Amino acid sequence: MRFGPGGFAIALVASALWSTGAASAETSQTIKTQKVAVKVETIATGLEHPWAVAVLPDGTYLVTERPGRMRLIRDGKVSAPIAGVPEVYARGQGGLLDVELDPKFSSNRTLYFTASIAADGGSGTAVFRAKLSQDEKQLTEVKRIFLMNKLSRGNIQYGARIAIAGDGSLFVGLGDRGEQDRAQDFHDDASSIIHIEADGSIPADNPFKDGKSALPEIWSKGHRNPQGITFDTATGKLYTAEHGAKGGDEINTPEAGKNYGWPVISYGVNYNGTKIGIGTAKKGMEQPLFYWDPSIAPGAIVVYRGKMFPEWNGDLLVTALKFQLLSRLERDAGGKITERERMFDDQFGRMRDIVIAPDGALLITTDENDGALLRVSRATN
C-alpha cells in the first residue's frame, strides 16, 4: 500500500491453482543482505507482466497484469480474471497499470487503478475508480475520474503510479509519452505529478487551481517518466522515482508548483550520446535528491516503515527493471541520500512494483512474460 502499512496478518498456503496459466510455487531461498538475512518466496508464477499488487484486508493479494487483467491470489490460488475491467490500450509500455485500495476499502470496497486507454488522437494515461463486488468476481460502479488532456501516438512513458494522501486524495505520476517538448508546457498534463480528489475534482490546495498559468490538476512539472511514487508515512513527504534517458534516473520530492527540469536539465544524455538541454542546473528548476548514472530503470519506490525490518527503518527501497535488483538507499540527518546496497541482482528478473505488506514484509512483482509475485520476509535462522 502506498498510503502505508496496516495491521492485517497474511497467511500463504501453496496449493493447486485455477487453469489460468498462472501457478503457485513453494520455492523459497534465503539471501544474506548487508544488515539482515531475508527469505524470498515465490508466491505465484505465470502472471503476464504483473504491474502492481495491493493487499486486501484479509491478506489476499490483488494483482494487475498489463494486458488488461486483475486477479486475486489467495491461499496459493490464482483466480480467474476479475470481470468489469474496462478496455485498455495494451501496446508497448501501456496497458492496465497501477492499483491502490481506498483507505476505507474494508467498508466501501473502493479501489483506484490506472491504465493507458485509446481514443481520438492516440492513447494516454487514465485514472479509474471502482468497487470490488462482495463475491470478488467483478468490478462495479467503474468510473473514469481522469484522462490526460492530450493524447498521442507513442506507446511509451505513461508514468501511472498512484500514491494516496492522508486525506484520501490521489497523486499520480504522468510521463512525457516520449515527447520531451511537452514537459515544460504547463497546459499539458504530460511530465507532471497531478493531484486530484477521489472523485476527480481539483483539491483546494493545488498550486494552479485557477487554471490560468497551468492546468488546475498539476501539482509539479518537469518529470520525465515517474513510475514510482510514494508517501513516507512518518513524515507525510511525497517521493518519486523517475526514469531518466541514458543516465539520470532520479529521486525527487515533488512540491506544489515546482519545476523538476526535464528536459532543460538532466544528469543523463540522449540515447545517441548527445547532450540534453543546457546541462545539469538552471535557476528556478529543482535538483534531484539523488540520481543514478548509469540508469537502473526504476520500477517503484517505498519508504520502509514496517516492523519486520527495523534495520531499514526510513530507508528508500527502489525496484529496478534494467538491472533487475532492489536498491536500498539511506538518508542522513541532513536529508542526503546514499545508495548502500543492491540486492537480488539478476536473480528474479525485472522488478516492477514494491509494496510494504501489513506485517512488514515486502511484496515485489516481476515484469516478465512469465511474471511472478515475490514475498520478502525475515529469515528465521
Image: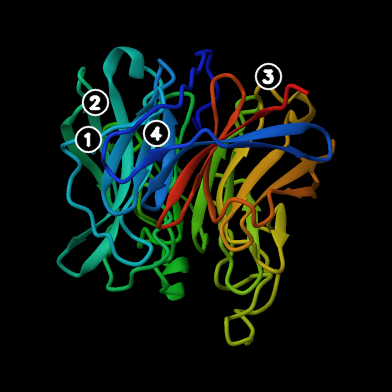
Say how many tags the image has. 4
Between residue 282 and residue 170, name the one nearer to us: 170
Q: Which residue is mark 3?
A: 307
Q: Earlier in the sequence, mark 1 or mark 2?
A: 1
Q: Which element type, helix, strand or loop, lies under badge 4?
A: strand
Q: Which element type, helix, strand or loop, lies under badge 3?
A: loop
Left or right of residue 296: residue 220: left
Q: Earlier in the sequence, mark 3 or mark 2?
A: 2
Q: Residues within 10 Å of mark 3 (few under 14, many from 20)?
A: some
Task: Tell me the amino acid under the disc marked 1.
Answer: Ile
Q: Quadrant of residue 140?
A: top left
Q: Return the mark for residue 100.
A: 4
Marks 4, 1: nearer the viewer:
1
Q: Return the mark for residue 132.
A: 2
Marks 3, 1: nearer the viewer:
1
Q: Quadrant of residue 266?
A: bottom right
Between residue 46 and residue 284, name the one nearer to us: 46
Q: CA distance from mark 3 to mark 1?
A: 32 Å
Q: Return the mark for residue 108.
A: none
The location of residue 65, given as percent across then percent down, is: 34, 47
Task: Tell me the amino acid under the disc marked 3.
Answer: Lys
Task: Tell me the amino acid under the disc marked 4.
Answer: Glu
Task: Tell me the amino acid under the disc marked 2.
Answer: Leu
| Relative height, residue 87 to residue 138 (above, below) | below
Q: Earlier in the sequence, mark 4 or mark 1?
A: 1
Query: Which residue is pictured at 68% across the width and 22% down the height?
Result: 308
Query: Which residue is pictured at 77% across the width and 33% down the height?
Result: 37
Q: Which residue is mark 1?
A: 82
Q: Earlier in the sequence, mark 3 or mark 1?
A: 1
The location of residue 55, given as percent across then percent down, is: 43, 26
Q: CA distance from mark 4 to mark 3?
A: 21 Å
Residue 208: tell me if it is visible: no
